[in-house]
Amino acid sequence: MLLLASVTSPMQAAVNAKSEEDTLYVQISQERLDVYPPQFVESVHETSDSVTIKTIDGEVHTYLLDLIQSVSTTSPDDLPRITSFKFNNKYNDQVFTDSEGEIIGDSLIRATVGGIGKRLTPSFQLSDTLAAAFVNGIRQRSKVSRLRFEEPVTYVVSRPGWQVICGDESKIEWQPYGRSYRVDVNWLTDSAEMTPTIYIDIEDGKIVSSKTTYLNAVIRIDGAGVYPDMEETPVQIKGRGNSSWHEPKEYHYVWDDEEYYYVYNPKNPYRLKFAEKVKPFGMTKGKSWVLQANSQSGSMMANAIGMKAANLMGAVAANHVIPVELYMNDEYRGSYIFNEKIGFSNNSIDLDDETNAFLIELDSYKEKGQYKTKTYNFPTNIKEPDFNDTTTVTPLKRQDILDDFEAFLKDVNRKNDISEWVDVDYLAAFLSVNELVCNYEIMHPKSTYLYKENLYGDSKYIFGPVWDLDWAFGYQTNKEYCTVVATDNFYRSPRHTFSESNDGTNTHYFWRNLRYFCSESLDRACFRLWTKFIKQGGSDELIEFCDDYFRFAEPSFIHDAWWWYNDDDYATFVENAKQWLTQRVKHIYSKLTPYDDILEEFADTGEWTAFPARKETDALDGIISGRTPTTHFTVYDLRGVQLKRNATFRDWRDGLTTGVYIVNGHKVFVP
């Protein structure tokens, strides 16, 4: 009788005294420590070779005396610790200033964060290599795991095999045992009384009336206590946009024999250019920036939500959005979005070497030097290098770029494998974002970008950045956002008429061929991206962002409505958007080709399990790309009748009418 020689033994003390100090620590080995708070212990029984602890839920836990190293009511003094905790803007797309957490004692971490959206990915370090951090039993990985910090979050720093009984009378369970830290985040957006404001004073009080001629000006930024301010800085400004641009008009009238002149200055978008690279709002340094007007009725949240989706899905060079109030020459201009200008620069498409790089825009608005492709009749503009600028010096030849692009389009039209032509990871993200928000602009096409880093090397086409989403979310159908078409099939929708090529092929056939018939690796990448987006909380974060963005931007929406006499109801927009996006995510995922090996990758949620500890799986990140072995599909209808056997990803849908089918054991909706 080693342990229960008297009623004052540690185990008996745990039963008799129900205070935290009498918690029982059973050390089995260096790798295993079982912790029993007294309120969960019903009885302790010792025999000549074992000790049995019965917990209040009736579970019995037996330990061989020969294997017990120690029993104590004192916690180990070498509990692992968090030694640093930080929210780094590199891992948080809407946070532009790093926030260092202040570790107070052994149980509290405080941090102040300026940013929209309350899910964050912290960077942290622990006191030893064996330690691991958990939240609600889920393993947390520095620079990877993402949580919502709207309320305090408790981290437990534990070691493998250290576990504690916890819970309540209805359910008790084992959880990791260790040192606990409560992380409190002070959100600057919660205390902000206004939206950030940009003041631009143009030389001689001129108004912006041209998309080609820059005017000299001075800019000042008030970050509203959330973002860094900018002192008065020289800048140049001009108009931008296609359908969103409207020429200012001068009106002349006579009243009581007096002549009056009035210039109507519409709510236009603008481009800003600085002489040197700057970091407005703390964003990545750059010379060129954009002020999006969002003048279309109800559109002031469309681009913000779409760009957030692009960030969450890993689209290339996804833009960030800052809602701002704009004043020009002391006159209020409305609520705008401030973000990066698309192009080769370190605040947009950041390349190591731009010498042989080129950027293409597909857009039906005619520009100087526009080229119509022979395949699909795409209106093609080479945006970089700028061959329209006679001062541009480049080793690239315009015709070489066009020939290369034509060759790519021909392979798509022939339904050849395009995995050697394009980066399927980024293509999957580009297509998924546009499909999610129903951005039919790419079908016309408009505002569609792709680039190559090296025309004469072995680089691939990269689709993106995603841009211009104010005609998405169903707007093209009924001029309202998030009210219809949540279940539209993006590639087969009968709702819209698209431009036709010379050979009678509709433009949307290009996207359909590209998505479904040109690469199984792309099909797999899309399924993996959507599985990750859903399983790892991306879709939830996008829904939350609708509320978070609206709360911060609402004062500017109200001011804009007063100035421009619009009655847009953005509170209703937000509720519609959350429901629409939820339905859209579910619909898209239901019709993807299922791949069992990808589902298995995401079956491990990272949840801690009781001893013996299972092997932890590294966090899943990135997208599978490159050539993949062919997967074959067997298709049944809901009556169990086999319709296809050993079909490929290209043809398993062929001939199937709209409905639900069983594909390799999974229910899949075919639109």
Image (tube, grey):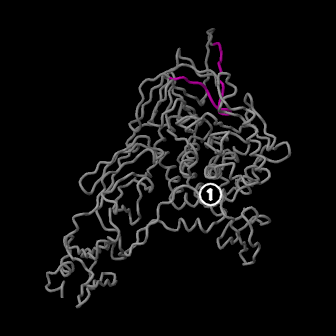
The residue sitting at 33% across, 73% down in the picture is: 168
Q: Amino acid at mark 1?
A: Ala
The residue positioned 76% from the left and 72% from the top of the image is 644
Queried whether the magenta region covers residue 624, the answer comes back as: no
Q: Residue 359 at what x, y percent from top left?
A: 65, 37
Residue sitting at x 47%, y 62%: 618
Please state which of residues 207 and 423 is positioned toward the viewer in this rendering.
423
Front-most of 267 and 618? 618
Residue 337 makes an appearance in the image: no
Point out the residue furthest to the top here.
257
Q: Is residue 496 left or right of residue 203?
A: right
Which residue is the site of mark 1? 525
Task: Name the outermost residue toward the right.
Answer: 503
Residue 492 x/y as whole percent = 75, 55
Regarding mark 1 in the picture, which secondary structure is present there?
helix
Quadrant showing the C terminus: bottom right
Is residue 108 left or right of 382 when viewed as pictured? Answer: left
Q: Which residues are magenta?
A: 235-254
Q: Is residue 261 above or below residue 38?
A: above
Q: Position of residue 245 (x, y in %)?
A: 65, 30
> Is residue 667 visible to us here?
yes
Q: Is residue 130 above or below residue 567?
A: below
